Image: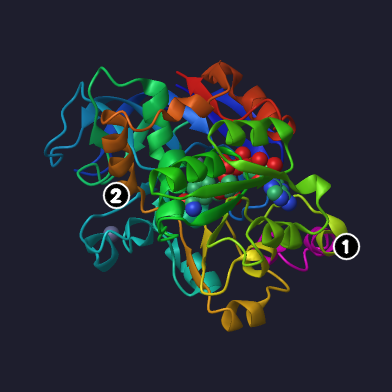
Amino acid sequence: MKALCWYGTRDVRVEEVPDPKILAVDDIIIKTSTTAICGSDLHLYHGTVPMMEQGDILGHEFMGTIVEKGPDVKDLKVGDRVIIPFAISCGHCFFCKREHYSCCDNTNPKSYFLKKMNGDATAGIFGYSHLMGGYAGGQAEYVRVPYANVGPARVTSELDDDDLAMLTDAFPTGYMAAENCSIQPGDTVAVWGCGPIGQFAIRSAYLLGAHEVIAIDVVPGRLKLAEQAGATIVNASNEDEIVDRLKQMTGGMGPDACIDAVGYEAESHGAVGLYDTVKQTLMMTTDSAQILRQVILSCRKAGVVSLPGVYVGMADKVPMGALMNKALTIKTGQTHIAKYMRTGLQLLKDGKIKPSEIISHRLSINDAANGYKIFDENKNEVTKIVLKC
Ligand SMILES: NC(=O)c1ccc[n+]([C@@H]2O[C@H](COP(=O)([O-])OP(=O)(O)OC[C@H]3O[C@@H](n4cnc5c(N)ncnc54)[C@H](O)[C@@H]3O)[C@@H](O)[C@H]2O)c1
Ligand SMILES: [Zn+2]
Ligand SMILES: [Zn+2]
């Protein structure tokens, strides 16, 4: 089969590789119809995620049709069209029982590495390094999906692939980030980053009752898409003092909730940004804290900071004093996708969302390597790429 394989920093290739096989009694194999490239895949592309191996198949946003199943797969059958959550969950551990699916204790066979680093490991994630389990990803013609009785959801033919593929990560991640803000009527929510996650966080914040959403990015094309969703926009590349600007826009108080949909690879601005870049380049720190500082300092007292943006290791100069003295609540995490994918599916069926609206490019899997390049280099025109198999 064809698959998009990782070879090093900014080196991904479409290659012929062996087809996957059923390995456990509750596995399914799907023939992929649509898969997407995620901002999280860019972290792999930039070579900033440890424990990648040459030839690893990437991709964690995918859907398709079941072509084979293990004997213990109960409700799904060969021929079913399914969407697959990006994180793998066992369904019966302490965390899965509480619907904290991304914290599953049983699906990351290499969890000892994360336990050393973070004190605990997350669930396994498709196509996302050996740190996250070493599972082959979904940017491939066929994918093995383990624990198939828990994650995959059957979908009917009237729903469109492009809408459905957005439910395997991007929409639910934006939605959980907004839900984590405990939005009250009249609230103002500020969202840093207008990539796919930010776009869906903006739309979800309105769905959940926000009065106003302020969208912050450095890319005009993406800010425009945020404006079309009703957000008030701020171009951070024109702003030295983003915190002051947000205070001015909110009567001096600051936004009620602040969402960081940028993460540890934030584009640097100003002297503090330069400091982060130098420390990251010299490998003295793994994560830029640029956005973390801005969200903590901007947020109103007793407000909520929601972090869907990915952080991988240590961040320097996080304003702990502000966090504590302002009585802020922080909510974060890999998305509990087995739950929120189903929330998204219901919203789609009810006609409340149209997630495909953010897709800018539809390419063949054969052009996947070029897809990575243009998504990385041309954020102004490229918002979200889906690959057709
Ligand atoms: N928590 C989860 O489960 C989960 C799931 C998917 C993605 N993510 C993470 O969410 C983040 C966003 O993902 P995406 O797909 O939207 O990525 P993306 O790269 O397409 O978008 C990031 C956006 O941030 C903007 N940005 C960069 N520096 C900035 C700055 N200094 N100020 C304001 N904006 C800035 C970029 O211009 C870009 O539009 C990534 O870190 C990704 O890894 C998390
Ligand atoms: Zn993703
Ligand atoms: Zn579990």
Q: Which stretch did the figure color magenta? A: 275-293
The CA span between labels 1 and 2 is 41 Å
Query: From the viewer's perspective, is 112 left or right of 239?
Result: left
Write the residue at 78% across / 60% down.
280
Mark 2 residue crowding within 10 angstroms, few (<14) / some (14–19) / many (20+): some
Write the residue at 54% across / 18% down.
362
Residue 382 within the magenta-colored segment of the rendering: no
Q: Nearer the viewer, residue 20 or 58?
A: 58
Question: Are the residues tagged 1 and 2 within 8 Å (C-beta)?
Answer: no
Query: From the viewer's perspective, is 73 left or right of 100?
Result: left
Query: From the viewer's perspective, is 12 left or right of 182?
Result: right
Q: Which amino acid does label 1 sit on?
A: Ala
> Which residue in the protein does label 1 denote?
271
Q: Where in the figure is residue 137, as x and y percent of width and height?
A: 46, 37
Q: Where in the figure is residue 373, as x and y percent of width and height?
A: 70, 29
Q: Which amino acid does label 2 sit on?
A: Lys
Q: Which of 120 and 333 is in front in this view?
A: 333
Tag 1, which secondary structure?
helix
Tag 2, which secondary structure?
helix
> Which residue in the protein does label 2 denote?
339
- Residue 363 sits in quarter: top right
Mark 1 residue crowding within 10 angstroms, few (<14) / some (14–19) / many (20+): few
Point out the image quarter for the C terminus. Answer: top left
- As displayed, is residue 117 above or below residue 346? below
Write the residue at 42% across / 59% down.
180
Q: In this rendering, does residue 278 appear at all?
A: yes
Q: Where in the figure is residue 252, as x and y percent of width and height?
A: 67, 66
